[in-house]
Image: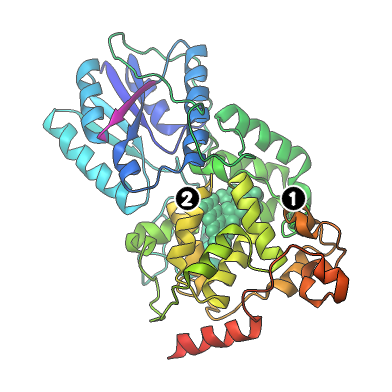
Amino acid sequence: MNVSVVLFTCDLRLHDHPPLRAALDGSRQVVPLFVRDRAVDRAGFAAPNRLAFLADCLRDLDAGLRERGGRLVVRSGDLVEEVCKVAGEADADEVHLAADVSAYAHRREERLRRALEAEGVRLHVHDTVTTAVEPGAVLPTSSDHFAVFTPYFAHWSRRRLRDPLTAPRTVHVPDGVGSEELPSRAGLSGLSPGLAAGGEREGRARFAAWLRSGVEAYEDRHDDLAGDATSRLSPHLHFGTLSPVELVHRSRRVGGPGAEAFVRQVAWRDFNRQVLAARPAAATVDYRAKHDRWRTAPDEVEAWRAGRTGYPVVDAAMRQLLHEGWMHNRGRLLTASFLTKTLYVDWRVGARHFLDLLVDGDMANNQLNWQWMAGTGTDTRPNRVLNPVTQAKRYDLHGEYVRRWVPELADLAAPAVHEPWKLQGLDRAGLDYPEPLVELSEGRERFLRGRSS
Ligand code: FAD
C-alpha cells in the first residue's frame, strides 16, 4: 500500500489521532486533507466565530505537519468530489475518516463510501476520535440508546478506554497534490470581539493549565458565574483539537472530586452524541413531543438576543455570548429556560441564535441541551422553570457577573443588582435599563397552561 488520504473534519489535531496513525502505519505517504465543505455554508452552519476558530486550527495543524516534514492540503467545494479528486491526484488507495454522529455526517459518509468504492478506493471510518466512548458501545437492554444520563454514565464509567496515541514524528506527503491557501481570520466580519484563539497547541496548553490549577476546584466552583471556573475547553472538543480519550485519561490520573466531576461533564457530551446518533432528527424535531403552542413574540425574542429583557442575569449571559461567542453553562441553562418557558418561545429559535454565535456551537450538544431545557428532550423533570432571580442570587451571589456584563448596573450592589425594578425614586430613575419584559409568575403560568392544553 502506498498512499492514504486522511480527511480531517472535527478532529483537527496530531496527538491521539487514530485515522492518522492507521494511515501512517499502512502507507508510505499520507495526504492530510481538509475540505471546506460548501454544504455546511449552505446549511447556514458556517458562523463567523467558528470560521475564525477553524482558521486558527487549520493554520496550527499545518504548522504541526510542517514541523514533521508534511503539510496540510486544503480544498473547498463539494466534499465528496474534492476527496475523490485528491485521492486520484495522489493515486491513493485508502481514505481514513473519524466517525461522526449528525444526520449530515451519516449522509456524507455514505456518499463518500460509494464514490470512493467506484474509484477502487477504500474508506476506513475510525471510532473514539470525536468521543471517548462511541455511540452504541454501551446500550440499555431494550433500546438503541440511553435516554437517561445516570444509567448511561454508570456504563460509560465502566468502559475501558483505549490508550491515547502519541503524535507522529514524521509525515511524508506526496508531491503534486495542490492546496488552496489556508484560511485566516483576516477578512471575516461579525466576529465576537472577545473570541478565544483556536488550534491544537492552544488547546493542549489550556488543558495542561486546567489540570494544574483549575480542575481541583471544579466540583465546588463550576456553577459560579463570576468565578469563570470551568475549563473553557468546549471549542477544542468541538473542533477536535483535544482528544476526549486523552482528556479523560489525563483527568483521571489527576484524580479527586474535581477531576471526577469534570470527567462526568465530558460524559454528558458523549451522552448527547449517542442520542443524536440514534435519533438524528432530534436536531430539529422534539425528542419527546409535548405539542407546545409556542409563541412567536418577535420583539421579546429580539430583547432576549440583545440582552435587554430587564432580568440582569439573563441579560449578562446573553451579552457574554455576543462578546465572547461563548457562555457559561449556568448562563446557557437560565437563558434557555427564560426563552422557552418564561417567554414560551420555540427552543429552535434559541438554538439557532446560539449556533449563530457559539464558537463551540455543536449539533449534538446545542440542540439536545436546548431540548433538555425546553422539556422536550431527555430531562426527567420537563416542566421545571428556572427562576432567574433565584438563580442569580445563588450563582452570582455578589452580583459581579451582572456588573461585568451589564455596565448600566455597575454601580449597584447585590441583591439590588439582581432586582433593579425594586429600587425606589431617584435610584431607579437614573438607570438606563429596561423594565422586566414579563412577570415571572405570569410567564410560568402561561407555559404550564400552554403545555397542558
Ligand atoms: P466544562 O464545565 O469545563 O466541561 C468540560 C466539557 O464537558 C465541556 O467542554 C463540554 O464538552 C462537556 N460538557 C459540559 N457540560 C455539558 C453539558 N451540559 N452537555 C454536554 N456536554 C457538556 N456545549 C457545547 O459544547 N456546544 C454547544 O453548542 C452547547 N450548547 C448548549 C446550549 C444550551 C442551552 C446548554 C444548556 C448547554 C450547551 N452546551 C453546549 C453544554 C455546556 O454549556 C458547554 O459544553 C459548557 O458550558 C462549555 O464550557 P466548558 O468547556 O468550560 O465546560
Which numbered tag is attached to residue 434?
none
What residue lies at 53% left-to-right and 23% top-to-bottom?
A: 60
Quadrant location of residue 146? Answer: bottom left
Instruction: Name the spot of residue 347 as percent of width and height, x first.
Output: 46, 68
Classify residue 379 as left or right of residue 420.
left
Instruction: Name the spot of residue 64 as percent of width and height, x first.
Output: 52, 19
Residue picked out by circle 2:
356
Q: Is residue 236 visible?
A: yes
For the C terminus, the quadrant is: bottom left
What span is colored magenta in the figure?
Answer: 73-78
What residue lies at 44% left-to-right and 71% top-to-bottom?
A: 346
Q: Amino acid at mark 1?
A: Ala
Instruction: Name the spot of residue 131 as percent of width and height, x first.
Output: 47, 46
Mark 1 Cα-neighbour bin, 10 Å: few <14, some 14–19, many ≥20 = some
Quadrant location of residue 427? Answer: bottom right
Q: Label 1, secondary structure: give it.
A: loop
Residue picked out by circle 1:
229
Q: Amino acid at mark 2?
A: Asp
Asked if the stretch drawn in magenta spans residue 85, the answer is no
Viewer-nearest of labels 2 and 1? 2
For the N terminus, the quadrant is: top left
Quadrant location of residue 418? Answer: bottom right
Distance (Cα) linking label 2 and label 1: 25 Å
Q: Label 2, secondary structure: give it.
A: helix
Classify residue 32 as left or right of residue 168.
left
Give the prevailing secondary structure in the magenta stretch: strand
- Examine the rendered structure and indicate whether residue 196 appears above or below residue 225: above
Q: Nearer the viewer, residue 330 or 148?
A: 330
Q: Quadrant of ligand 1?
A: bottom right
